[in-house]
Amino acid sequence: MASQTALPLAGITVVSIEQAVAAPFATRQLADLGARVIKVERPDAGDFARRYDETVHGESSYFVWLNRSKESLTLDLKSDEGRDILEKLLSTADVFVQNLAPGAAARMNLDAQSLQQRYPALIPCDVSGYGNTGPWSDRKAYDMLVQGESGLMSLTGPDDCPSKVGVSIADIAAGMYAYSGILSALYTRATTGTARAVEVALFEALGEWMGSPAYYTEYGGRQPSRVGAEHATIAPYGPFPTADGTVLLSIQNDREWSAFCAEVLGDESISTDPRFCRNSARVAHREECNALISERTRLLSTDDALALLDKVSIANGRLGTVSDFLSHPSLAGRDRWREVATPGGPVRALLPPANLSGVEPRFDPVPALGAHTDAILGELGYTDRAISELHTADTV
């Protein structure tokens, strides 16, 4: 593994008061690239995502995913001593990230405006549900709720069952925008000397991803249909039965459709049938189109169907499981797996998706609660006796 000093964000210190998914996802990506991330946790329980489950050697699957390469510092931020320690950290930090409950940061004098008055070089990043201002600023927001409020759940699942996406997509979207916003702010500070605050709302992050159905609804007069694994505005697109399973296929244009009709369906005339001659017609006659395709694919094994689709350059895939993903040949063939230590034992972890030539991301351990508290306090000038007294007082 490359040394930390070779990483792009080496020398950047991030202090984060974070919970759950969105903010930890942003800071883990900063840590991957070499930033020092000091995760401030409550002494009694820490980040509540630590207790979502115990499936990874006794640790939470969410926590292991989101918190490698960080340092865990426990602080009672309701105590004067705890707040004093936090202020000492912030005075030399580059970035402060928080996703506290609505209004909590302002009550603690940790809002962006207050922080920038005290520490002009600090980049504060707030991650919230609906933003720090506006009529919904005081509402709690979790991933499922934002999927519902954004309209995403009205697009997802079968026709008779609105469904949420199976991963925390609103949190992930917000974490990605917080990460890119922080990188932009670091670049701005480096080139202009001005430290700008970053604010990301889960609702607005997922709202950006709702762009296509939003335009379709506003200018088409109705929202896209809920069609399960199929595509609301493209056909054929989705799963089709085979003799021994299921294949996924996607046809993006009329040239592909013509080749598909001739080589897979064995009837080139289908491509000029008025019901199927263009994509909008195929969407309008989706059931008939799907029936024609299913009649053919049911005669083929999954492997034969995939081979035939490959032969005519039609995009295709298998309906895999999570276990299939874990053993996917693309990940193994591209050497995407690394190893990370956790308090309960080593686990596999994937490389970050953005590959920087010559850079090997960090894969330092997932920290136990408070694992770095004493070392960080020592860096701040606390003696062993003072640290012991802080522990006795349950401040750390």
Image: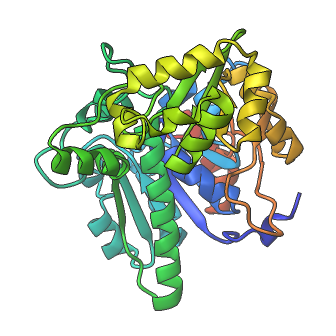
Q: Is residue 158 left or right of residue 134?
A: right
Q: What kind of colouring is applied to the model shown? A: rainbow
| Tally of numbered discs | 0
Q: Quadrant of residue 145?
A: top left
Task: Say if 87 sits above or below 299 in the image.
Answer: below
Quarter of the image where the C terminus is located: top right
User: Residue at the spot x=35%, y=45% of the render?
Assistant: 206
Q: Nearer the viewer, residue 23 or 393?
A: 23
Task: Say if 78 sits above or below 53 in the image.
Answer: below
From where the camera sits, is residue 141 visible?
no
Q: Residue furthest bottom?
A: 192
Q: Is residue 277 left or right of residue 109?
A: right
List x then y, in percent, for residue 246. Answer: 64, 17
List x then y, in percent, for residue 336. Answer: 81, 45
Task: Say if 12 sits above or below 192 in the image.
Answer: above
User: Residue at the spot x=52%, y=62% of the render?
Assistant: 89
Q: Residue furthest front?
A: 269
User: Residue at the spot x=81%, y=60% of the render?
Assistant: 360
Quarter of the image where the N terminus is located: bottom right
From where the camera sits, is residue 365 visible?
yes
List x then y, in percent, for residue 236. Answer: 49, 33
Q: Quadrant of residue 114?
A: bottom left
Q: Residue furthest top?
A: 244
Q: Nearer the viewer, residue 197 or 357?
A: 357
User: Residue at the spot x=46%, y=90% of the render?
Assistant: 192
Q: Quadrant of residue 10?
A: bottom right
